[in-house]
């Protein structure tokens, strides 16, 4: 069975990548992210607030009974902007091998999402409880997120929630960028300057299974970060950008780029739920140096 989500994916990306956001678009986007982290699966169409008229209904696909995961293939160059085919309950090894170099695969499932790694951390689990976020998927539910929503929205808000939970235990005053439409979605959060310091710290939260980028991919990514930093500096003075991946193995290294203006943290939470103390210590010291703390 297949489902075509080309128009859906293009619409979502056009909203997420607007050069200029409006308060209404920000409200819509925040609402979508809040809905999916609370409801990674939904029991039936009637359970969506507003029923069939709820826009969130279009972010989910009805799956056959007994399916515990959804496989999706999409063109690598398109990132869901080209035709996307979804298959239900078929192991990846049994799916067609044609165009294997041209297509990428995504599996939509609780196990693939890394949610349970995060829930083993008591600070993050308590943060999810406090905010009403789903700590597990109900796999018996009929509606699951379409792959573009799962990969580009659900995983994104998982990373943001996990990193926010850890950082708010250490620092007060973490600010959302939702109040700044001109730089919204360039980064995820901002820690304002203190003690008379001229600049603060900007955060970009990630939820990647593998972090390290190499060669051309790394250079292109850092170019994009540099461009975003120039944009936000005109609105919120920023002395350091910290790119933080929520989950980690022991691989990857903490690295500074752009003459110390960009710090990459390959992960905070280990698969057993413990915090990678070395990475966290480096992160805290870097932030304290910018903010003038001892």
Image (tube, grey):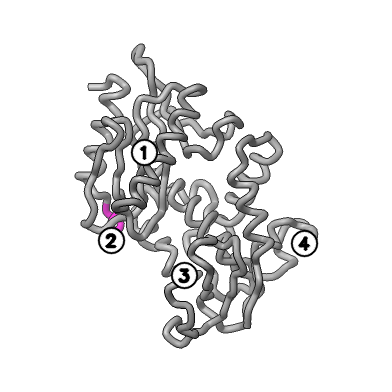
Q: Position of residue 156 (x, y in %)?
A: 48, 52
Q: How far is mark 4 from mark 2, CA to CA?
A: 39 Å
**Marks 2 and 3, the one that precedes in the sequence:** 3
Image position of 19 with respect to 99: above or below: above
Q: Which residue is mark 4?
A: 51
Q: Position of residue 185 (x, y in %)?
A: 53, 40
Say if mark 2 contacts mark 1, CB within 8 Å: no
Q: Position of residue 88 (x, y in %)?
A: 56, 80
Say if mark 4 contacts mark 1, CB within 8 Å: no
**Marks 4 and 2, the one that precedes in the sequence:** 4
Q: Is residue 77 left or right of residue 4?
A: left
**Marks 4 and 1, the one that precedes in the sequence:** 4
As drawn, the label of residue 104 is: 3
As drawn, the label of residue 167 is: 1
Q: How far is mark 4 from mark 3, CA to CA?
A: 33 Å
As drawn, the label of residue 272 is: 2
Q: How far is mark 2 from mark 3, CA to CA?
A: 28 Å
Taking depth in this image into account, of 86 and 279 the one nearest to the observer is 86
Taking depth in this image into account, of 217 and 57 the one nearest to the observer is 217
- The residue lying furthest to the right in this view is 53
Name the front one of labels 2 and 3.
Answer: 3
**Marks 4 and 3, the one that precedes in the sequence:** 4
């Amino acid at each position: 069975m297949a489902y075509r989500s080309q128009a859906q994916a293009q619409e979502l990306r056009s909203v997420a990548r607007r050069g200029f956001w409006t308060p209404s678009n920000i409200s819509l986007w925040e609402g979508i992210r809040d809905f999916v982290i609370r409801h990674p699966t939904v029991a039936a169409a009637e359970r969506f607030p507003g029923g069939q008229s709820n826009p969130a209904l279009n972010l989910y696909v009805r799956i056959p009974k007994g399916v515990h995961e959804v496989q999706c293939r999409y063109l690598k160059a398109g990132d869901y902007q080209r035709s996307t085919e979804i298959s239900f309950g078929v192991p990846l090894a049994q799916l067609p091998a044609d165009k294997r170099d041209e297509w990428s695969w995504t599996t939509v499932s609780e196990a693939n999402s890394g949610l349970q790694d995060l829930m083993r951390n008591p600070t993050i689990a308590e943060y999810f409880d406090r905010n009403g976020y789903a700590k597990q998927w109900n796999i018996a539910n009929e509606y699951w997120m379409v792959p573009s929503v799962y990969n580009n929205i659900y995983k994104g808000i998982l990373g943001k929630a996990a990193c926010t939970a850890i950082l708010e235990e250490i620092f007060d005053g973490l600010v959302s960028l939702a109040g700044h439409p001109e730089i919204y979605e360039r980064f995820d959060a901002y820690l304002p300057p203190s003690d008379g310091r001229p600049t603060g710290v900007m955060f970009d939260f990630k939820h990647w299974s593998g972090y390290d980028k190499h060669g051309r991919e790394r250079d292109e990514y850092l170019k994009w970060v540099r461009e975003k930093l120039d944009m936000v500096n005109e609105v919120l003075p920023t002395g350091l950008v910290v790119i933080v991946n929520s989950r980690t193995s022991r691989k990857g290294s903490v690295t500074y780029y752009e003459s110390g203006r960009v710090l990459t943290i390959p992960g905070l939470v280990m698969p057993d739920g413990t915090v990678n103390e070395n990475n966290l210590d480096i992160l805290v010291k870097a932030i304290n140096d910018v903010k003038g703390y001892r």
